Amino acid sequence: MVSPLDDALALLAEQPQVLICCDYDGTLAPIVANPADAVPFPDVVDVLYDLAVMPGLRVALVSGRAMRDLRSLSGVDERVTLVGSHGAEFVEGQFLGFGPVQQRLLDELAGRAESIVGDAPGAMVEYKPTSFAVHVRNADPADADRVMAQVAEEILSVDGIFITHGKKVVEVAVIHADKGEAISELRDGAAVLFVGDDVTDERGFAALRARDVGIKVGLGDSAAQYRVPDPAAVKALLEQFARLRGSWAPEARS
């Protein structure tokens, strides 16, 4: 039986230009205890390459990870555009609005975060070029609650920061970043397919237009029009879109 998502993908495949944007963790790679261990699911990168070389298609990964880490972990080549740091990093190591003042603030707050997680086994601070993230996924629930309460009290009330809440994680940035703005920057007139799993992807879904398709991975409230259960389904829908695009003959519609 044809589902509403099937219909939406079929219509999207007939758009002359399509930008395919995917989150990384929890979408193309598993959520793992150690963020440095998150490698793509088998064969999903090959599917991205298949899409990227089709006429009228562009593929991008838009992730909260620093671009250097995203490039290293994903293993993708120049066929796939990378945008790191939740949309703040289009060129590796270059961040608009980041200077010595922001660096000092980042260092100070990250130091506070390290002190907070120091006596909470399993909690950790992940460092990024213009932000840091406090992870409590692997901490005891009581420790996790205490860490997040201290972070809220001692860090999140500071002026000049930008806060992003995720699943068992809070990220503190010292410059503005927005996946929705990143998608708008990449769009260049194309229709968009955006797939993501986390709270941080909601700004991306909110930026989509009527002809675009947003797909939420997993449970939770979302502004996305459609939903798939897990990353395995993401690979399947990307393969489905490749088949639909491959059967669409632009010359027959001119």
Image: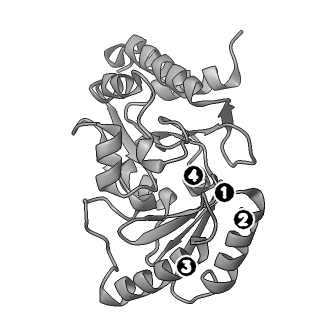
The residue that appears at 36% across and 37% down in the rendered structure is 59
Q: CA distance from mark 4 to mark 2?
A: 27 Å
Identity of the residue furthest to the left in this view: 78
Report the disc number at residue 143: 2
What colour scheme does the image use?
Answer: one colour
- Mark 3 neighbour class, 10 Å CA radius: few under 14, some 14 to 19, many 20 or more: few
Q: CA distance from mark 3 to mark 4?
A: 29 Å
Which numbered disc flags the more N-terminal residue, 2 or 3? Answer: 3
Which numbered disc flags the more N-terminal residue, 3 or 4? Answer: 3
Find residue 105 and report its image quarter.
bottom left
Q: Tell me residue 20's x, y (percent).
A: 43, 37
Image quadrant in which the N terminus is located: top right
Q: Tell me residue 9's x, y (percent).
A: 55, 25
Instruction: Tell me the element at label 4.
Output: helix
Q: Nearer the viewer, residue 206 or 81?
A: 81
Instruction: Tell me the element at label 2.
Output: helix
The residue beneath circle 4 is: 201
Instruction: Tell me the element at label 1.
Output: loop
Instruction: Tell me the element at label 3.
Output: helix
Q: Nearer the viewer, residue 40 or 116?
A: 116
**Which three-letter amino acid code belongs to the residue tagged 4?**
Asp
Report the disc number at residue 115: 3
Q: CA distance from mark 3 to mark 1?
A: 15 Å
The residue beneath circle 1 is: 139
Identity of the residue furthest to the right in this view: 142
From what the image shows, is residue 183 above or below residue 124?
above
**Which three-letter amino acid code belongs to the residue tagged 3?**
Ser
Q: Nearer the viewer, mark 4 or mark 2?
A: 2
**Which three-letter amino acid code belongs to the residue tagged 2?**
Asp
From what the image shows, is residue 115 above or below residue 25?
below
Q: Tell me residue 56's x, y (percent).
A: 32, 31
From what the image shows, is residue 190 above or below residue 63?
above
